[in-house]
Structure formats: C-alpha cells, structure tokens
C-alpha cells in the first residue's frame, strides 16, 4: 500500500497566523492535514501544526514544490514570485489574477472602477504635489493608504485633516508606496463574505457588521443591522466581484455603507477576521468552505444558525494580562465560545476572540462581552 497521500489532500498554506491556524483546524476535521509555511516558530498556527515549516519567505518556491495546491493567509508576499510559480505550473488558489487585486490597493481600485463597481475617488501619490492636487479636488480630510499591506500591527491608513499633517505622513512613510482616497461619510462598516469554487459555484454568508474601537476591529455582528435592500446589494456586489476576479476560496469584500450608498473599501482573497463569526454562526465555517473551495469540493451551507451571532475580539492591553490565565472564568460564561490563538500577550495584539449567539444582537453581544471581560481579568460592568 502506498504511503503517499492522494494529491487532493496535499494542501499547503503560506502563512501561519491565526487565520492559518483556524483554516488548519477546519481541514483537519475533514481528514486533511495541510502543510504550513511559517515565518516564526511561535506563529499561532505553527504552535498547533506539528509539521509547520519554519522558514524565510524566500523558501516559498521550495514549499510550493512540496504541495499540490497552495493557498495563502496573508498579503505580504511578492506577487511577481507567485506569478512565476503559477506560470511554472504550481496550482495557487485563489490564482494570481485575484491575488494581485487583493495585494495591491491601487490595482484593486483600478480594476473595480473599470468594471463599474462603486469605489471612493483615489490617486497614486508619487510625491507631495500629487497629494496637494488631490486635496484641492476633493478637500480635506484625505485618507492616505499604503498600497501594500504592512506587517501585522503596522499602520497602513492615515486620515489627515490638514496640509501639515498630510506632509508629515508623506515624509514619515516616504519609503512606502502610497495612495490618496476621498474620505467617506461612513454610516456602517460591513463585510460581505462569498466563497467560490473554481467552476464558479458560489455561496454567500450573511452580511456582517464590523465595529471599530480605537482604530481596531472590536466586534463583529451578524447579521448586520441593515435593511433587506442593502443586504441584497452587498451580496450581489460581492458575488459579481468574485466572478469578475475568478476568485477561488473565500473572498471578503469590505464595504462602507455611506450616506450615499455602498462603497467597496477593500478586498481580501482569504478567510477574513469578520468571518470568525461563521465558526459557530453558520453550519459550515468560512475556514472549512475555504478549504473545500480550494480543493474543488462541494461547498457547505452558509446560512445563520441563530437569529444573531456576535464575536468580540480579545485584544492585548498595556497591563500585560494573558487571557490564557483567565480561561476558567471565561468558560464559566455558558453559551460563549472561546478561541485563543496561543500568542504571547502584547498591547494591541489580537490574542483570541469570543463568539456567542442569541435571540437578538443585544443578547448575543452581552454574553460575548461577558466572556471577553472575564478573559481580560475585568469584571463585566
Ligand atoms: P486596513 O487594511 O489597515 O484594515 P482599511 O482600508 O480597511 O485598512 O482602513 C481601515 C479603516 O480606516 C477602515 O475600517 C475605516 O474605518 C477607515 N477608512 C479607510 N478608508 C476610508 C475612507 N476612504 N474614508 C473614511 N474612512 C476610511
């Protein structure tokens, strides 16, 4: 009997953070053990996956050779390298056509604009003159963004109110490729998750709402508290974008609901933080459906299993509290689902999340917040 695994199961994941950790867990449930390309031995998924490959990102080509299909959990990879691998026959899912749109915000904006999708006005910033031209046309505040994703925790968006502020950001971030964007009057921040198989079969998750606190995503609510028309429009936008880009796997479409309607903020061609809510909130999580899609297996149902599901992120504070030390108190909050990523506590770092379901959003939120407060050693007001 051959000891070789069937090719279908030879899945590699580039990256070993918490997204890879949860994707790995979902694959293991299906009897598939993906290989991982970690950057550090204490990356969240590397701690959970015994055969993680600890390596410098330069080793991507070697890693790709050892897997039949590869997928990615982050955007910090040279797209040119991936394109060369794909040309050489490596099966990358989603493919580089989709990944280029997710990795490069300028390219993304151009592609979306050309296909008629609603995006904020934007311009590439080659120097201060470009910024001043943009501000003259669209007025302050102006949003300055790094065109490519930074390292985890590295800031990539600055909302500037004045010329002086804008010049300071331009000079401090001069080493990065930057773009300007028109400031949007945001009413709600939404995420439409769609998962697509290579042949085009798609499923949509219920629209989620993202609540920010101190510049970081604090809470995810599903379904988003929006009307049927907005929810249907968001679903249709996400599906059309996934089809246009021939995405495979999860495509997360971050949307702003503005006073003028829906606008696309960003695309992520991978499971998304807002989709943690699907682990308990849907019959098939975004992670499992991502694995199914990239292996071209039938997708599972994506509907909500409860009237309301809320996920609260567990973010490291300056007090150095380790949520792992308070696991018992959090697990005592019955009905909450605790996820810890095995990371060392650091201020601002996402150490885990808690999900709870309820008859309405308030009930679900209350329970998730109680468990999160317990993890962080706080009494819940
Ligand atoms: P990141 O990739 O760092 O999450 P995003 O593009 O999602 O960057 O932006 C982060 C946050 O900045 C958004 O969630 C939103 O609150 C704000 N933001 C981004 N772009 C705009 C914009 N054009 N107008 C107003 N606010 C914006």
Image (cartoon, rainbow, N blue to C red):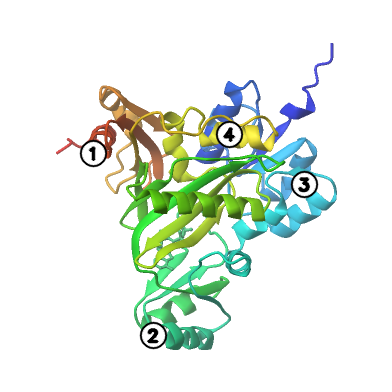
Task: Name the secondary structure under disc 4.
Answer: helix
Alpha carbons under labels 2 and 3: distance apart: 44 Å
87 lies left or right of 362: right
Q: Earlier in the sequence, mark 1 or mark 3?
A: 3
Camera-side mark, 1 or 2: 1
Q: Earlier in the sequence, mark 4 or mark 2?
A: 2
Alpha carbons under labels 4 and 2: distance apart: 46 Å
Q: Residue at x 58, y 41 (%)?
A: 195
Residue hosting label 3: 61
150 to 69, vertically: above or below: below
The answer to whether the residue labelled 2 contacts the one labelled 3, judged by CB atoms less than 8 Å apart, is no
Residue hosting label 4: 289
Q: Earlier in the sequence, mark 2 or mark 3?
A: 3
Give x and y (percent) for residue 277.
41, 37
Tell me, for residue 362, which label it has, or none.
1
Residue hosting label 2: 163
């Amino acid at each position: 009997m051959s000891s070789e695994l069937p090719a279908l199961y030879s899945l590699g994941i580039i990256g070993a953070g918490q997204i890879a950790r949860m994707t790995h867990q979902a694959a293991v449930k299906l009897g598939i053990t993906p290989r991982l390309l970690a950057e550090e031995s204490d990356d969240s998924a590397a701690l959970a996956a015994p055969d993680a490959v600890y390596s410098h990102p330069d080793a991507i080509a070697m890693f790709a050779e050892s897997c039949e299909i590869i997928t990615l959990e982050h955007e910090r990879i040279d797209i040119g390298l991936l394109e060369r691998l794909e040309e050489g026959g490596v099966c990358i899912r989603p493919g580089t056509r989709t990944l280029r749109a997710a990795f490069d915000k300028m390219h993304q904006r151009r592609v979306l604009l050309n296909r008629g999708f609603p995006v904020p006005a934007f311009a590439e910033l080659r120097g201060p003159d470009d910024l001043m031209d943009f501000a003259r046309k669209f007025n302050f505040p102006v949003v300055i963004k790094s065109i490519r994703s930074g390292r985890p925790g590295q800031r990539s968006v600055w909302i500037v109110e004045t010329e002086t502020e804008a010049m300071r950001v331009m000079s401090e971030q001069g080493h990065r490729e930057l773009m300007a964007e028109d400031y949007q009057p945001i009413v709600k921040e939404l995420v439409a998750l769609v998962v697509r198989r290579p042949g085009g079969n798609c499923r949509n998750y219920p629209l989620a709402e993202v609540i920010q606190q101190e510049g970081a995503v604090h809470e995810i609510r599903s379904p988003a508290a929006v009307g049927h028309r907005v929810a249907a429009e968001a679903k249709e936008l996400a599906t059309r974008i996934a089809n246009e880009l021939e995405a495979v796997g999860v495509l997360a479409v971050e949307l702003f609901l503005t006073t003028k309607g829906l606008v696309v903020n960003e695309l992520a061609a991978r499971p998304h933080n807002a989709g943690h809510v699907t682990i308990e909130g849907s019959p098939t999580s975004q992670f499992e459906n991502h694995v199914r899609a990239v292996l071209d297996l039938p997708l599972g149902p994506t509907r909500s299993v409860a009237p309301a599901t809320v996920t609260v992120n567990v973010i490291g504070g300056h007090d150095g509290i380790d949520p792992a030390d308070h696991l018992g108190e959090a697990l005592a909050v019955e009905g909450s689902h605790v996820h810890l990523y095995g990371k060392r506590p650091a201020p601002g770092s996402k150490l885990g999340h808690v999900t709870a379901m309820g008859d309405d959003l308030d009930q679900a939120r209350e329970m998730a917040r109680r468990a999160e407060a317990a993890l962080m050693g706080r009494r819940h007001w």
